[in-house]
Image (cartoon, coloured by chain):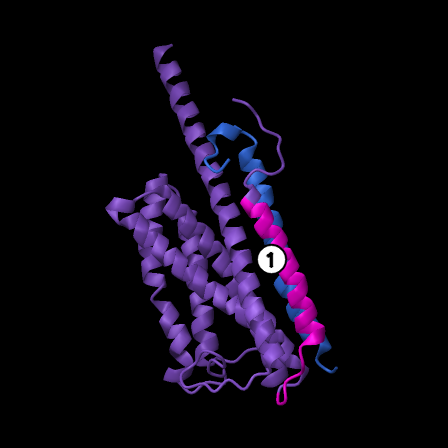
Amino acid sequence: MDDLGFILGSYVVTFGSILLYVVSVVRRSRRAGRDIPHEQRPWT
Amino acid sequence: MTATRDRNVTGTPFTRGLGVVTLAGIALLVVLGLFVSPADVTQGESVRIMYAHVPGAWLAYLAFVVTGISSAAYLWKRTRSLTWDRIAGASAEVGVLFMGISLVTGSLWGRITWGTFWTWDARLTTTAFLFVTYVGYLAVRGLGGSHHQRARRSAVLALLAVLEIPLVHFSVRLWNTLHQEASVAGRGTDVTMDGLMLFSLFLGVFVFTLMYVWLVLHRQRALALQDMLDDTGLDAALAARRAEAVA
């Protein structure tokens, strides 16, 4: 398969960047949530 | 104030279930896209990039339309709420991510089929312009001011930015471009795609949509927490000033 690098690269870019974004979202929410009590979170 | 050390700050049973289903869908999509679905008659193996590229582009459109609708809901007095503003912000952020993915995967696909990573083609140029517009939108959200000032100015910008989407979508009809027209849902398209290819493509769109919902739910909750923290900080600063004045 001549284009294997490009094909695999597209999957790595797609799911790698989504994973990085998920990690950043989780980290930011944990940082922000440290000082907010449970009862003040409307979704809990 | 009680400090909470829980790890699952923005999660609920619904988002946890959604996350599990999304992960399973991603695994199935990768297997189908890379190994099971057949190669294309004309494009060969490179068609496998389609299962990441097309859902990415779809998601970016969806995200920007949701940003526009949420912004309109914020600006309309009857429905004015900062929740709409946070949904708009979260959706735009996810949309920028997926638009970036779509640009990069499209560039890799273009290198195989057109022989170049980039050309100033109408679809590519308008897509890049849309991407830059929403990066600007996110920058505007980061400017100072109260939550409502942020919400108002970014809502106006979002309503202007969403007008670019039809231009991007119809650019392949309005101008002669290298980029092909829509293969599945285009004008007068006769879908001759293999059943498994079509299934993989729709699975990709479905899974990416689930992922979008998961991401936006978590991100807008994180933005809500940030707003609460900002308010707490402001209240504390005001109390300190009052105490100083009394002393």
Q: Residue furthest bottom?
A: B42
User: In the rendering, at what x and y percent does residue B115 appear?
Assistant: 61, 85
Look at the image and say whether residue B33 sits in the magenta stretch: yes
Q: Which residues are magenta?
A: B14-42
Is residue B44 in view? yes
Reply above or below: B39 against B57: below
Is residue B115 in view? no
Q: How many marks?
A: 1
The residue at which mark 1 appears reads as A18
- Direction from residue A27 to residue B81 in the image, left or right: left
User: In the rendering, at what x and y percent does residue B2 appear?
Assistant: 55, 23
* Label 1 CA crowd tier, 10 Å (few <14, some 14–19, many 20+): some
Who's the residue at 68% across and 62% down the image? Answer: B27
- Direction from residue B135 to residue B156 in the image, left or right: left
Chain A pictured colour: blue
The quarter holding residue B42 reads bottom right
Look at the image and say whether residue B160 sits in the magenta stretch: no
User: In the rendering, at what x and y percent does residue B70 appear?
Assistant: 36, 53
Among the chains pictured, the one given purple colouring is B
Reply above or below: B180 against A29: below
Q: Residue furthest front?
A: B195
